[in-house]
C-alpha cells in the first residue's frame, strides 16, 4: 500500500496503515523512508545556505584582498570559487582556508619592499596572487572539500588539511626566509644562493616552515578533528614543503638572462632582456611545484591517518 504522509509532519499518516500483519511492517518501512527523505531535504537546504554564505563571505574577502593588492583580478575569481567550496563543506573548512589566506597575505606585506628588492631579479611573480597561484596552492584542498560533501569521511579532512598545511609551510618559509638577513644555501649544491632562489634553505626559513605546518594543525585541533588527522596535517605540511624545496632545487625550470647572464625564473629579466632555459624541466615552474607540494602534503597526511588507525 502506498505511504500517505501527513501535511506537516512528513511521516506516514494512520490512513496509510492497512489492517492485518502488513500494517506494522508497512508503516515502519514508510516511516523510515519518510525520515530518510526529510533528512536529505534538510541536508540539501543546509548545503544551499552554506553555498550562499560562502559566496558572500568569499567575495567580500577576495575584493578586500584585491584592494590591498594581495590578489589580481583572476586571483579574485579563484579565491571566491575556492572559498565557496570550503564553506559549503563546513565552517571548519571555511575558517581553515580564511585563516591561512589572511596570515599568508599579512606575512607577504611584512617588509614587502625589502623582500621585493632582494628577490625581484629572481621570482617570476610579485606579491599579488593570480588564478594559477590560487589553484596551485588550494586546488587539492578544494577537491578534498568537494569530496567530503559527496562522500563524507575523515580521510578527506586529512587530505585537505595536509595540502593546506603544505601551502602554509612553504609560504611562511618563503616570506620569513627572504625577510631576514643572510643568504640561504641550495640543498643541491650546499652553496650560498640569492634570497628567493628555489631550493634554497635557511635556519629561519626552516623554523618558519615548521611553524606554518603547526599553525594549520593547531586549527584542526581546535575544530576537534581526530588526533590522527591533526598529526597527519602537521607531518603532511612539513613533507610537502620539503618536497617543494627538493623539486625547486632539482627539477624546477631554471632560466638564464641572455643579456646579463643572471639566473632567474623570469622569462623576461628585470634588465629587459629575454631569458632561456638553463636547467630543469621546461614548463615545471613554481606554480606546478607548489601544486605538487600540496599533493605530497595531502598524501602524507592521509597516509599517516591510515597508519594511525583512524
Image (tube, grey):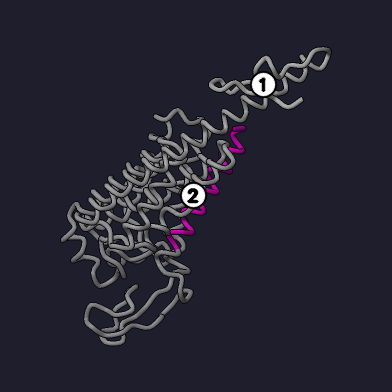
Which residue does the image show at 80% across and 13% down from the upper left? 19
Residue beneath disc 2:
297
Are there few (<14), some (14-19), or many (20+) residues within 10 Å of tag 2? many
Residue beneath disc 1:
31
Which residue does the image show at 36% across and 46% down from the upper left? 55
Q: Magenta stretch mostly in which secondary structure? A: helix
Which one is earlier in the sequence, the residue at label 1 or at label 2?
Answer: 1
Q: Is residue 145 left or right of residue 267?
A: right
Marks 1,2: beta carbons within 8 A: no
Q: Is residue 259 left or right of residue 21?
A: left
State the image coordinates of residue 105 (x, y, percent, origin top left).
Answer: 26, 51
Quadrant of the rendered structure where residue 189 is? bottom left
Quadrant of the rendered structure where residue 133 is? bottom left
State the image coordinates of residue 178 (x, y, percent, origin top left).
Answer: 26, 58
Which residue is at the far bottom? 259
The magenta segment is 289-310
Q: Is residue 21 magenta?
A: no
State the image coordinates of residue 294 (x, y, percent, origin top left).
Answer: 47, 53
Which residue does the image show at 67% across and 14% down from the upper left? 14
Amino acid at each position: 500500500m502506498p505511504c500517505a504522509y501527513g501535511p506537516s509532519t512528513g511521516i506516514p499518516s494512520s490512513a496509510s496503515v492497512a489492517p492485518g500483519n502488513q500494517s506494522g511492517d508497512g508503516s515502519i518501512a514508510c516511516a523510515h523512508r519518510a525520515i530518510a527523505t526529510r533528512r536529505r531535504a534538510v541536508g540539501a537546504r543546509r548545503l544551499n545556505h552554506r553555498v550562499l554564505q560562502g559566496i558572500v563571505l568569499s567575495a567580500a574577502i577576495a575584493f578586500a584582498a584585491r584592494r590591498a593588492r594581495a590578489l589580481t583580478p583572476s586571483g579574485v575569481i579563484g579565491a571566491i570559487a575556492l572559498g565557496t567550496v570550503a564553506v559549503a563543506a563546513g565552517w571548519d573548512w571555511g575558517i581553515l582556508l580564511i585563516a591561512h589566506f589572511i596570515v599568508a597575505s599579512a606575512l607577504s606585506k611584512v617588509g614587502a619592499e625589502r623582500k621585493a628588492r632582494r628577490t625581484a631579479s629572481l621570482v617570476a611573480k610579485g606579491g599579488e596572487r593570480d588564478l594559477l597561484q590560487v589553484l596551485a596552492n588550494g586546488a587539492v584542498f578544494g577537491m578534498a572539500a568537494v569530496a567530503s560533501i559527496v562522500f563524507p569521511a575523515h580521510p578527506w579532512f586529512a587530505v585537505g588539511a595536509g595540502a593546506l598545511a603544505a601551502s602554509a609551510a612553504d609560504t611562511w618559509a618563503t616570506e620569513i626566509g627572504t625577510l631576514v638577513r643572510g643568504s640561504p644555501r641550495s640543498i643541491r649544491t650546499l652553496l650560498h644562493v640569492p634570497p628567493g632562489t628555489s631550493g634554497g634553505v635557511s635556519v629561519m626559513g626552516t623554523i618558519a616552515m615548521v611553524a606554518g605546518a603547526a599553525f594549520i594543525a593547531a586549527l584542526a585541533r581546535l575544530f576537534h578533528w581526530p588526533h590522527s588527522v591533526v598529526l597527519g596535517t602537521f607531518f603532511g605540511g612539513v613533507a610537502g614543503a620539503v618536497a617543494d624545496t627538493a623539486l625547486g632545487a632539482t627539477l624546477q625550470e631554471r632560466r638564464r638572462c641572455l643579456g646579463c647572464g643572471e639566473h632567474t625564473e623570469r622569462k623576461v629579466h628585470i634588465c629587459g632582456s629575454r631569458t632561456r632555459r638553463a636547467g630543469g624541466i621546461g614548463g615545471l615552474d613554481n606554480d606546478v611545484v607548489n601544486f605538487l607540494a600540496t599533493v605530497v602534503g595531502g598524501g602524507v597526511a592521509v597516509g599517516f591517518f591510515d597508519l594511525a588507525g583512524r
